[in-house]
Image (spheres, rainbow, N blue to C red):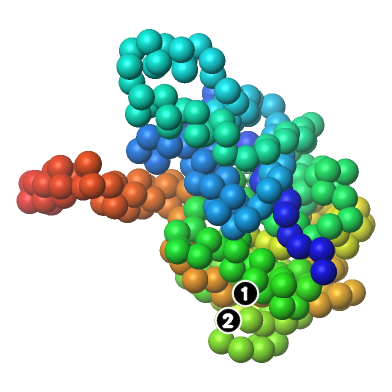
Amino acid sequence: MIPVKKAVIPVAGLGTRFLPATKAMPKEMLPLIDRPIISYVVLEAIRSGIEDIILITGRGKRAIEDYFDDSPELEMHLRNAGNQRALQTIQEISSLADIHYVRQKEPLGLGDAVLRSEKHVGNEPFAVLLGDDIIIHNTPCTRQLMDVYSHYQSSVIAVETVPSEKISSYGIINGRKIDDTISCLLDIIEKPNPADAPSSIGAIGRYIFTPAIFDSLKQTGRGIGGEIQLTDAIKALCSSEPVYAYSFSGKRYDTGDKIGYLKAIIDFSLRDAEIRDDLLEYLSRISLS
Ligand code: UTP
């Protein structure tokens, strides 16, 4: 069995839900306290055992490359100022992993973004992590999927139950249950009307694919919203080889959505020993006024 060693992280979307902020900065660089969202996604991949990361970038995403790059001038400044703590943090970021960048010339959709990675991924299974989904658990979500992959040696997508008012924002699955956490995928529909949805279980931003997904993507035309949808390629894939849906363990934040982003900031602040008490004190005061 070829192990999963590569991860593709698409970050080339326009982030229209965060305009006007995303006019000048990538939504993946929005901070959760003092670290950008994308850093948590990259860390999840590394903690899962991924050795090679491919970021699919686009126009206006330069700040992401700068974030993971060396910064000799800043390092020199921190060294001269004797700020060892900040220096160490900065150096850790640039030595995190082997990161490669592939450009998606136009934001034609998530499916097109994943297809851009084909040359770099080659004929191997690989992980896909969406650059705006953060999942917190002791066993990283990607690692959980890799374990399922090791067992079935088939593509596997992470899913969770979504509230009825959000069904039309997700790829919704129809599956044959194998056990409490795993189903064999029978169908997946991108952004269905709630009345037509086969279930309330939606695909979230974590996947492991066999390289067969690339052929499915090449045969996938433009779908909903005029974009090449990854969901449509998964639908085609599951008619030619088994694809599994896995109910992951962990708490997920959809930081591409305003309320999801705010929830992540609050929860991350409450987990931060340096700011937790001050935040709680502040919140208790505003709730009284
Ligand atoms: P989203 O639809 O959540 O991101 O795509 P978006 O298009 O940037 O945001 P909105 O909806 O306009 O606010 C999911 C992921 O796929 C990437 C995005 O960067 C995000 O991580 N993506 C999307 C691409 O890389 N390329 C695309 O053409 C579309």
Q: Quadrant of residue 242?
A: bottom right
Q: Which residue appears at 76% of the width and 62% of the height?
A: 3
Does residue 167 show up?
Answer: yes
Say which label, 2 or 1, has the lower sequence index: 2
Q: Which mark is residue 246?
A: 1
Choose between 78 and 213: the one closer to the eye: 78
State the image coordinates of residue 260 (x, y, percent, origin top left).
43, 52
Type of residue at label 1?
Answer: Tyr
Crowding near the residue tagged with mark 1, few <14, some 14–19, many ≥20 C-alpha atoms within 10 Å: many
Question: In this rendering, would 58 be left or right of 112?
Answer: left
Q: Which residue appears at 11% of the width and 51% of the height?
A: 284
Type of residue at label 2?
Answer: Thr
Question: In this rendering, would 214 be left or right of 172?
Answer: right
Does residue 26 show up?
Answer: no
Locate ligand 1 by image quadrant: top right
Q: Quadrant of residue 213?
A: bottom right
Point out the image quarter for the N terminus. Answer: bottom right
Mark 2 and mark 1 in contact? Answer it, CB < 8 Å: yes
Q: Which residue is mark 2?
A: 181
Number of numbered discs overlaid on the protein picture = 2
Q: Secondary structure at mark 2?
A: loop
